[in-house]
Image: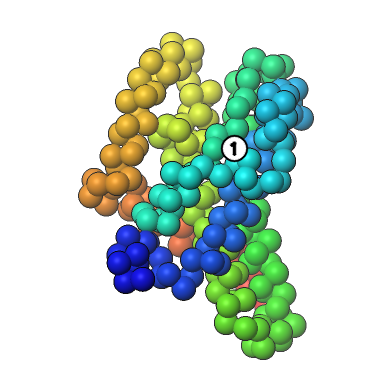
Amino acid sequence: MEFLERFLRFPLEQLPLIIVVLLIAFTVHEFAHAFTAYKLGDTTAKDQGRLTLNPIQHLDPLGTLFILIVGFGWARPVPVNRYHFKNPRVGGIFVSLMGPISNLILAFIGAGIFNIFVMTGVAGSLHPLVTQFFNLFVYFNVLLFVFNLLPLPPLDGYRILEDLLPNKNRARMTQYESFGALIFLVLVITPLGHYTIYPIINTAVPFVIQSIQRIFSIFL
């Protein structure tokens, strides 16, 4: 057990709760991409069985392993053919954006339910695991919201940036995308991340969580 804990970002006893949280967070995130694309006229994800809330269809083994080891990761990207949209650029932005937004909504829902427990006086009688679950639920969904908005391939923030830039810049980005994905992995698994990605994550995630709590504190 001690040997395993050396490689995990989180305590081993939290692992079952984290796995449940990730199953929900990743599944809803990818479903949001697929559902938005479908509503905008692209059936690619639906045709490939990705318009579903079945987590097996969405989990990426490496991405899940990364979140357990380094603290953040990813699911299997939903296939999207943006040229099925009436406006490929606008449609592409909406599809990319709805994944992270779905995680932010989940964080609000989790925080809202727990704050209802607090307001009704139920929170004090809850089992510690329940409280821990809601804390992890809010944390990981905010983490995925922030992380996926980073403008690095293969994240949603990169896709949004692609669609915002002129065609000539988009073509150049596509040309070097594989190198960008390699740079992303280097930043995630080496100490370079402590000077690039981690400061953003460590600043933005607590800020978003505190902002959510401030909104609910109005009603307490």
Q: Is residue 147 visible?
A: no
Q: Is residue 34 left or right of residue 153?
A: right
Residue at figure coordinates x 42%, y 32% from the top left: 153
Crowding at dot 1, Cα within 10 Å, few <14 / some 14-19 / many 20+, comes out as many
Residue closest to the eye, 109 or 213: 109
Query: Which three-letter amino acid code belongs to the residue tagged 1?
Result: Leu
Q: Quick one: 180 or 86, which is closer to the camera?
A: 180
Q: Which quadrant holds the C terminus?
A: bottom right
Q: How many marks?
A: 1
Instruction: Classify 135 as above or below 124.
Output: above
**Is residue 148 found left or right of 70 in the rendered image?**
right
- Residue at 48%, 15% in the rendered image: 166
125, 210: nearer the viewer: 125
Task: Residue 82: give x, y in percent of width and height.
Answer: 63, 20
Helix or strand or loop: what does disc 1 sit on?
A: helix
Q: Is residue 7 above or below residue 147?
A: below
Residue at the (30%, 67%) spot, across then down: 3
Q: Is residue 18 above or below residue 160?
A: below
**Residue at (35, 20) in percent of width and height:** 176
Residue at the left extreme, as displayed = 191
The location of residue 35, given as percent across then percent down, is 72, 35
Q: Which residue is mark 1?
A: 97
